[in-house]
Amino acid sequence: MKVRPFKVKPQEETEPEPEPEPEPEPEPEARGGHPEEGTPDGQPGPGREEPGSGEEGALEPRSQETQRETSEISEASGISGPLAAPRRLRTDCLEAPLSRAFGHLGATVGDHPWVFLLLPALLTAALGTGFRHMGSEEEDLEENYTPIGSPAKDERHFVQKHFSTNDSHSFSVSRMSVETNFASLLVVSNNNSLLDQESFAEVDRLDQAMQTLIVQENGTQIQYTEVCAKYHDLCVPSNPLLYSWQQDRTLDLKRVTFPVHVHNGRIISLVGVFGGSTLGGNQLLLEAKALRLLYYLKTEVKEDDEQSKKWLIHFLDKFKEMKKRLALKKVQVVHFTSISRQLEFEVTSKTVIPLFHLAYLLVILFAVISCFRLDCIRNKVLVAVFGVSSAVLAVVSSFGLMLHIGVPFVIIVKNSPFLILGVGVDDMFIMISAWQKTSLMDSIRKRMSRVYAHVAVSITITTLTNVLAFYTGIMSSFKSIQYFCIYTGTTLLFCYFYSITWFGAVMALDGKREVLCLQWLKKPDQKWSSLKKACCVPFGSVPDEQETDVHPMNVFFRDYFGPFLTRTRTKFFIVLTYILYMTSSIYGCFQVQEGLDLRNLASDDSYITPYFDVEEHYFSDYGPRVMVVVTENVKYWDKDVRQKLEKCIMNFEENKYVDKNVTEFWLQTYVQYMKNNSQDPNDKQSFMDNISGFLNTFPNFVYDINISSSNEIISSRGFIQTRDVAYPVKKKFMLQQLRSIAKKCEIPLLVYNHAFIYFDQYGAITENTLRNVMVASAAMFLVSLVLIPHPMCALWVTFAIASVIVGVTGFMAFWKVNLDSISMINLVICIGFSFDFSAHISYAFVSSSEPSANGKAIEALHMLGYPVLQSATSTIIGVCILAAAQAYIFRTFFKVMFLVMVFGAAHGLIFIPVFLTFI
C-alpha cells in the first residue's frame, strides 16, 4: 500500500500571530503554500513557486540560503514536514540525497522517454519467456504444504529404513510408511441402518462392479485383479464384514460385535469400516448408518504404481456411469481416491485464471474514475490505463524471472497478481498527483525532475517496507509460503522499477500531449487530423496556472470528517468501539482453528467435498492406526525390559485419544506362544530360536520384527488405535501427547503414521506465524526509526501493527478462516500495510504546526485521509474478485486481505488520529 506524499500546513495560515521569541520562527516562505496532497490534480497555491518540488529544489547548489534549501528538501521528499525550524530535529539525512538522485533520474526520463518506455517492454518480453516452464511438473502437496524438517518426516525415514513391506503378497495398510494407492467408497443407507440383507445385496453389486472394472489402453487391458494389493495371492477385501457375508450369506448381521467381530474362528477388525453405529449389550452392533469400501492398489513398484493410477483415473471417469447403471435404491454412494486431491488441486488452480481478467478491468475502471477530469489537460484516463499495465508488466517480469531460475510455481502464487494489481497502482496515483503540481509552462525535463524528487521517499519507503514484510516470509517452515513471498516480494520490486522507468516515460509522453492540447485550446487549428484532435478530448477552457485544484475528498476530510472525529462525544464512542474491537479480537484469537484442511485444496463443487462431509459425520470416531516402534536393540528376553515396554504400552492405552481394545503388539503374542509351547521367554537362546516358528504361525507379524544377519532384533513395532481426533486441535494434542509418552518411556520409542506428515502442520503453524510476525514487525520498527526518525512515530507504528494483527487474527475465527499457510501469508502482509497506514498519519500529526492536538489530527486527515482511503480501496478492488472464486484457498486470501485493509484503514483514519489527541 502506498500513500501519497504529505507535507505540513504552513504556520501563517494555521496559527495566530506569534509572540516575539528569543529564537524567531523561519520565514513563512520557507514552508510553502497550502499543499493539497493525495489528489491526482492538486496544484500549487497562489503565488507559490514551489522551488523544492522539482529540478531546482532537487538540484540547486548548496550555496542557496539555509532556510530555502531546507524547505526544498522538505517538499521534495514527499514525507517530511517543515524541518527548517531550528528547534526541530533534522530528519533529511536520507531524504535529501534520495530526492536529488530521483530528480536526476526524472530529468533523464523526461529527456529520453522512448528509451525508458521500450527498454522495460523488451525486458518484460525477455523475462516473460520463463512462462514456458510453468506447469512442466505437478505440484507436490506434501512437499509444499507440510513443515520443512517435521518430526514425522524423520520418523518415516526410520520406518522405511528398518521395516519392509510387500503389497503384492502381504499387504497391510497400517504397516505402510506412505499413503498407498486406493479408491474409497462411502455407502450411506437411506434408512436407519444398512445391516440387512437387501442393503448388503446392493453393496455387493457395487463391490462386484468395482472389481470388474477394466481399463482399455492401446489394445491391452488392466484388470482390477492385476493392480489390487494382495494378501496371500488374493486381493485385499474392500470390507471385511462384506467379504465374510459374501462367503457365507447366512451370516447374521444382527449378531455382529464392534469394534472386533469373530466369524468362524477368524478375528475381524471393524474399526473405520462402519460409521454412524449404535451399540447394544455385549458390544453388539445394532445399527450402522454407513460403511466404507476400500480398494487398495499396488504402489511399491514403479510399473505397478503407474498401472494403479491408470485404473484409478478410469474409475473416476466411469463412476457416475457405473452408479447410474446400478440404480441403487437402498443406499447412496460418495467416492474418493488417493490421486483425487492432486487432480482436483490442479483443476482448482485453473478456475482462478478467468478472474484475473475481470480484476484487471475493475482496477482499470477504478484508476480511470480516479484520474478522470473534464478538461483535456488534467484528464489522465490513458495514463491511468498505462499505469495499471505497469503492474501487469511487473507480474510478467517477476514470474518469468522466478520460473527461469527454477523457483517452483505453487498454486497460492496465483493469488499474487490480484494483490499486485491493487498495490501496484498506488505508485501511479502518487506520481500523477505530483505531476499535477507542476507548472504547464515548465519543460518536460523540469516537470519530470520535480515529480521524481517529490515522490522519492514516499514510494521508496512503502515499497521497502512491503518487500521486507514479504521477504521475512522466506523464514517460514512451509515451502508454499516461501515461494509465494519470493514471487510477490520480487514482483513489488519490479513494480517499483517500472513505476520510475516505464510509467515515468508514459507521463513524459503525456506531458507532450498536454502541450499539444494547450496549443489547441489557445489557438484551435481546424486542419488538425481527427486523431490529433482526439488527444485533446474532453475539451475545456485554458486552465489557470495559478489556480489550486482542491479535490472534494480532501475538503470532506478537512471540513467534515476531521472536525466530527475530534468532538468529545465522538472520541468517547470511538474509544468504546476500540475496546469492543480489541475484546472481540482477543476472544477470536483463542477460537481460531489451526491447520489446512486438505479438502479445502479442491473447489466447492468437487466430488471430494461430499465425501469428506460424510466421512466427518459418520467416521470421525476413529483416527489413524499408529505404529509404536522400538528404535534400538533391546533385550526382549529380559523380563524387566518387557515390563518396562508393557508399561509404556499401557501408558499409550490410558491416553484419552487411544482405544485400548484394539492394540496389537507382537511381543505379547510371542510370549504367550512360547509359554504355550513350554519355552522360557526369559532365555535369550530360546527366545531368538523360536521367532521363526512364531512368524510361520502368525504371518501378520513378519514385517514387524527386524532381525539382523547376526540374529539380533534391531527394531520392532506394535500398533495402537487412535480415536476422537476429528478436529485439527484434537489431532494436534493427540500427536503431542503420543510423542510425549514415547519420549518418557524408558525404552527408546517413536510413534508414526503417514498422516502425521500433515498433522505436524497444526503444531508448526502457530510457531511460524509468531516468528514471522515478530521478525517483520522488528524490521518495520527499524525502518521507521531510520527513514522517519521520530520516536513517537515508531511507537504508534508498533501499536498499529500489533492492533491490526490481533484484530485480523481474531476476526478470522468469526469468518470461518483457519490459521493455515494461506492466512499466515496475509498476516505477514498485514504488517507492511499497517506500517504504511500508521506511519504517515502519525508523522503528519507530530510534525504539524497546529497549536492544538485536535488541529493536528484534522490537518493530518486533511492531507492523508483520501490517500489512505484510496490505497485501501484499490487493494480491496484488486482482490475482491477472489470472493467469487469456487475454492477456499482463493476466498481465504480475499477474506484476510479484506480484514487487513479495513482494519488498517480504520486505524489510520479513525483510531490513531483520535488516540493521538490524548497525548
Image (cartoon, grey):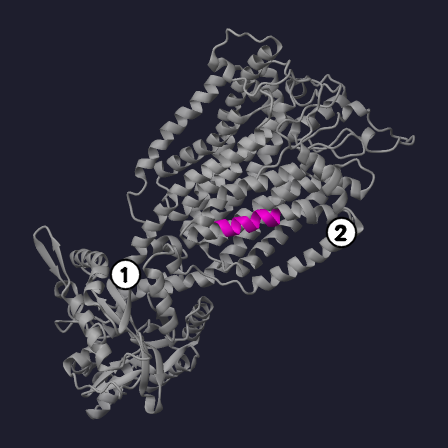
Q: Main secondary structure of the magenta part?
A: helix
Kind of residue sitting beneath label 1: Ser
Q: Residue furthest right?
A: 20
Left of 770 or right of it: where is 638?
A: left
Circle 2 packing at 10 Å, graded few (<14), some (14-19), many (20+), is many
x 61%, y 59%: residue: 585
* Residue nearest the viewer, comparing 892 with 705: 892
Residue 422 lies, with reference to residue 885, above or below; the image says: above
**In the image, residue 224 lies at what x, y percent?**
15, 64
**In what quadrant of the picture does the N terminus appear?**
top right
Mark 1 / mark 2, whichever is N-terminal: 1
Q: Choose between 197 and 908: the one closer to the eye.
A: 197
> Residue at left 68%, top 26%?
549
Measuring from the top left, give residue 879's x and y in whole percent: 49, 44
Q: Check disc 2 and report the residue beneath it.
A: 571
Mark 1 is surrounded, within 10 Å at the Cα level, by few (under 14), some (14 to 19) or many (20 or more) other residues, namely some
**Would you identify the image quadrant in which residue 725 lies?**
bottom left
Question: What residue is disc 1 on?
Answer: 338
User: Which residue shows up at 24% across the image and 64% down it?
Assistant: 182
**Amino acid type at image mark 2:** Lys
The magenta stretch spans which residues?
Answer: 894-904
Q: Quadrant of residue 905?
A: top right
Question: Is residue 886 shown in magenta?
Answer: no
Residue 641 makes an appearance in the image: no
221 or 105, which lies in front?
A: 221
Left-right relation of 289 to 710: right
**Circle number at residue 413:** none
Secondary structure at badge 2 equals helix
Which residue is drawn at the image coordinates 46% and 63% (left, top)? 763
